[in-house]
Image (cartoon, coloured by chain):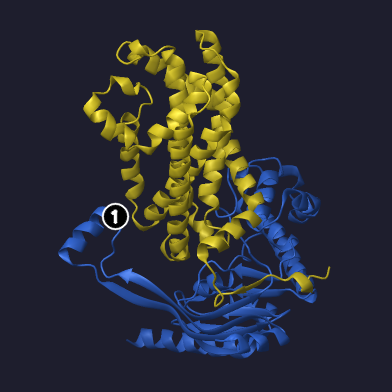
Chain colours: A yellow, B blue
């Protein structure tokens, strides 16, 4: 086999923009992303009897508990509270799981980073990919619950890919930011856990924004990027509406900005990772 | 380090070139692990960074088809040098030029997932090295054949013995035809017949023009397999030459320092 014509050349002296180089690298290693996602899905449930079904049973179980506990407190004004909670939870757990996994994989994948060159963003990108698969699977119980409790499923469901795309971009951006910091300080991962819990209760996931006092609503909700993303996620499926254009634009802005910031920050630091992990 | 120099490099048989390479680790004089500690110390003004050069002023060129040994005491910078060649680290100063695809041999734990079967791990490992599934599919039979793991290929790797895992790793890393193969003290695993098999494969490999870099503390392996050897000490190259010469000098140095330690 004659390989002389296409030998890859690596020259440490020729360094272009780290952010662009990483973009090219992650495209070249797309098969690795597929393998990482496959690995995550396969290993997560490999030794359990119900296997991948847990992806669907997990949010369903949480939804049932929350519905029983909170439907009186929060659900009074909300029609089809179970579906409201479940749709919020699906979007929220996608975000929480993807960002957490991005951090864990990068920190625990350290031994790999020290041995072999792979694009460093592979960990966060594959974590988001795994999260997407789980999100798509958990739409099945959502549709099921809506059918059971009588929330109509409208044609607007075809708009669902838009909020999912923005959620994924936002999660990837945050995942890159947090995982970069976690490389430098081990307790960032722990602090992030607490932050996530607080953040979830500040976001209308299990309650509707109307129950908040007017004075707080502006500050707590409107400045919270996840509020927009979750509202946008609920629109085509739970509310059965065509997504409001203003909401789409705001969400797109949030998603693009976060992804850009995360990517730039991560790639500006990633050459140091091998020195740190 | 201009464009003119890089033209010179293209014309001869070098596949790896290190020019005045240095790698500096910044170690906080008191090790800071957590963000909280960092903030506390920052306020107290106690963050002092100590520099530690793992490699300094290293010049080295390795030719195509060469099998070169890397020796030196622990902490001499051998692994750091491999990381530069594997592109895992960028040098703090100087230049590293590598032509061709580099495959490090991934040991158990790094490239394998214990819960996945041998079959699944072959594809994962291949993807880590940049290969698609269908490309790995073509190589699959050959890899399993070489690793002698047909019976266990659908068993999770956690149930493999360390020898079996090492065989699988070696089979994958060599089957993908890398231009440069990095072996970091890994030949000691596997039984004798497999070791012989891997030696002959490396020999065959080298004849096809692949370059092999071997790190070992076992001088006999270096003598047996490498034409040239590099002796690293405290981050600098102490000696480069034919392996018998370098190994002899290294052994002598080790003995004399042992002797000195005994007398003291």
Residue nearer the viewer, A28 or B264: A28
Q: Residue A60 placed where, x, y %?
A: 48, 20
Q: In this view, does A132 lie to the left or right of B99?
A: left
Crowd band around label 1 with a 10 angstrom C-alpha radius: few (<14), some (14–19), many (20+): some
Number of numbered discs: 1
Q: Locate residue A156: give its quadrant.
A: top right
> In what quadrant of the picture does the N terminus of chain A appear?
bottom right
Q: Locate residue A48: give its quadrant.
A: top right
> In what quadrant of the picture does the C terminus of chain A appear?
bottom left
| Residue B188 visible in the shown view | yes
Q: Residue B109 placed where, x, y %?
A: 55, 52
Where disc 1 sits, the SS reads: loop
- Residue A270's place in the image compared with A211, above or below, is below
- Residue A13's place in the image compared with A165, above or below, is below
Q: Residue furthest front?
A: A245
Q: Which chain carries label 1?
A: B
> Which residue lies at the image location 53% right of the left edge and 22% below the top edge?
A237
Residue nearer the viewer, A73 or B13: A73
Q: Residue A137 placed where, x, y %?
A: 58, 27
- Residue B253's place in the image compared with B29, above or below, is below
> Which residue lies at the image location 32% right of the left edge and 16% below the top edge?
A74
Q: Residue A202 placed where, x, y %?
A: 31, 31
| Residue A44 visible in the shown view | no
**Residue highlighted by disc 1:** B34
């Amino acid at each position: 086999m004659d390989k002389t014509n296409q030998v890859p050349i690596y020259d440490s002296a020729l360094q272009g923009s780290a952010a662009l180089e990483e973009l090219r690298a992650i495209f070249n290693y797309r098969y690795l992303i597929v393998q990482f996602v496959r690995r995550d899905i396969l290993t997560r449930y490999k030794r359990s009897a119900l296997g991948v079904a847990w992806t669907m049973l997990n949010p369903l179980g949480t939804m049932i508990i929350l519905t029983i506990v909170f439907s009186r407190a929060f659900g009074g004004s909300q029609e089809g509270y179970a579906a409201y909670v479940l749709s919020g939870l699906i979007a929220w757990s996608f975000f929480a799981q993807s960002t957490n996994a991005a951090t864990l994989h990068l920190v625990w994948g350290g031994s790999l980073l020290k041995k072999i060159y792979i694009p460093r963003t592979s960990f966060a990108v594959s974590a988001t990919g795994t999260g997407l698969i789980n999100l798509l699977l958990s739409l099945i119980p959502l549709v099921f619950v809506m059918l059971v409790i009588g929330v109509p499923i409208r044609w607007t469901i075809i708009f669902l890919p838009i909020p999912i795309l923005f959620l994924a971009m936002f999660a990837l951006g945050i995942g890159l930011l947090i995982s970069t910091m976690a490389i430098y300080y081990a307790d960032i991962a722990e602090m992030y856990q607490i932050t996530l819990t607080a953040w979830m209760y500040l976001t209308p996931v299990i309650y509707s924004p109307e129950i908040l006092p007017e004075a707080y609503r502006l500050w707590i909700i409107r400045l919270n990027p996840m509020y927009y993303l979750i509202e946008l996620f609920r629109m085509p499926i739970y509310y059965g509406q065509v997504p409001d254009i203003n909401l789409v634009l705001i969400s797109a802005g949030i998603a693009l900005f976060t992804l850009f910031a995360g990517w730039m920050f991560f790639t500006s630091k990633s050459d140091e990772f091998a020195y740190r992990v | 380090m201009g464009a003119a120099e890089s033209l010179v490099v293209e014309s001869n048989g070098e596949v790896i070139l290190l020019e005045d390479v240095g790698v500096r680790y910044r170690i906080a004089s008191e090790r800071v692990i957590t963000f909280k500690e960092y903030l506390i110390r920052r306020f107290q003004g106690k963050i002092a960074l100590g520099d530690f050069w793992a490699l300094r002023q290293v010049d080295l060129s390795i030719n195509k088809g060469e099998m070169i040994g890397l020796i030196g005491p622990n902490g001499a910078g051998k692994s750091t040098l491999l990381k530069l060649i594997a592109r895992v680290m960028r040098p703090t100063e100087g230049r590293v030029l590598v032509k061709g695809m580099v495959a490090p041999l991934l040991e158990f734990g790094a490239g394998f997932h214990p819960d996945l079967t041998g079959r699944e791990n072959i594809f994962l490992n291949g993807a880590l090295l940049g290969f698609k599934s269908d490309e790995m599919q073509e190589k699959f039979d050959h890899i399993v054949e070489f690793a002698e793991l047909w019976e266990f290929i659908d068993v999770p790797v956690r149930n493999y013995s360390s020898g079996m895992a090492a065989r699988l790793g070696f089979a994958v890393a060599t089957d993908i035809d890398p231009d440069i193969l990095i072996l970091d003290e890994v030949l000691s695993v596997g039984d004798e017949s497999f070791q012989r098999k891997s030696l002959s494969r490396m020999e065959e490999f080298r004849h096809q023009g692949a370059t092999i870099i071997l790190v070992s503390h076992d001088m006999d392996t270096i003598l047996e397999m490498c034409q040239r050897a590099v002796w690293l000490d405290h981050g600098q190259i102490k000696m480069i030459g034919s392996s018998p010469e370098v190994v002899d000098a290294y052994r002598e140095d080790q003995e004399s320092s042992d002797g000195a330690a005994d007398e003291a």
